[in-house]
Amino acid sequence: MAYQKTIIFLATPFDFEAVDLLDKYVPAFKIASFEITDLELLQYAAEKEKPMILSTGMANLGEIEDAITAIKSVGNDDIILLHCNSLYPTPVEIVNLKAIETMKDAFKVPVGFSDHALGIHMPIATVAMGACVVEKHFTLSREMKGPDHSFAIEPAELKELVRCVREVEKAKGSGIKEKSELESEEMYIKARRSSHAMVDIPKGTKITRDMLIIKRPW
């Protein structure tokens, strides 16, 4: 069904048997936060030579470094970290979005965000900060029974999240500070101050301030 809808199918293994089972179906292995210290599992999955996506909830920088070292020890350098909080739902005061920048600087690998806060605004903010992956719990209805449904987003919210993320990606731009080609020259004329001659000024005359008037556009 996922392939029919052009959706990439992923699942999280928690043991060697699950790694072998999923290997035929997934293009990458997503490792849950609670398994990041299981270095043997990380190595076993990494040996399948597929990208490794690691959630880092509750992990400190030393544990993350150990996990990366274990994966690289079997020749797999294709690693993405996800900043994550292992509290469901996550209060905004502990989300700590700046940890994304910390991990990017510390480990020189792509970093994304696995969100457990309410609403859709946190992952949108992380995209502006350079997050390369956004993970969000999804449900058909928050009224359904189960541990994750109450803080997950519903279909309309997922659609809005995707729309906002795509707009933020476009809005990030090149980082070069200059006038956009879409900005009108008319606005330069209307909005910027300009100098106008108060008297006729013959060619070659040295212009002084008393010959000019500075006009505002309003």
Image (spheres, helix red, strand yellow):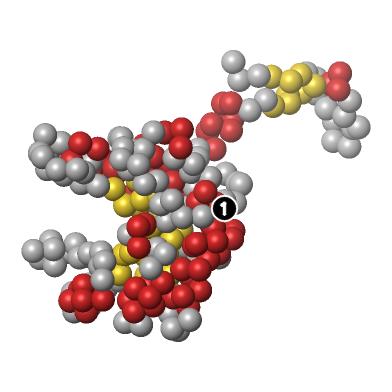
Q: Position of residue 28 (x, y in %)?
A: 30, 71
Mark 1 secondary-structure assignment: helix
Q: Position of residue 125 (x, y in %)?
A: 43, 41
Which is more toward the observer, 34 or 49?
34
Asked whether residue 156 appears in the rendered view, the answer is no
Query: Mark 1: which amino acid?
Result: Thr
Q: Nearer the viewer, residue 86 or 112?
A: 86
The residue sitting at 50% across, 51% down in the picture is 100
Residue position marked by numbered label 1 in the rendering:
102
Residue at x-position 30% and y-position 69%: 29
The quarter of the image holding the N terminus is: bottom left
**Relative to 190, residue 144 above or below:** below
Asked where in the image residue 140 lies, by quadrant, the reply is top left
Q: Residue at x 38, y 75 (%)?
A: 40
Residue 148 seen: yes
Q: Image check: 74 left or right of 157? A: right
Rendered position, 33 above or below 65: above
Rendered location of residue 133, percent (x, y)? 37, 56
> Would residue 25 appear left or right of 79 to someone viewing this image?
left
Count the marks: how many?
1
Q: Nearer the viewer, residue 36 or 213?
A: 36
Task: Note whether 48 is above or below 152 in the view shown.
Answer: below
Q: Quadrant of the C terminus?
A: top right
Q: Residue furthest right?
A: 206
> Residue placed at 30% from the left, 40% from the top?
88
Name the residue furthest top: 218
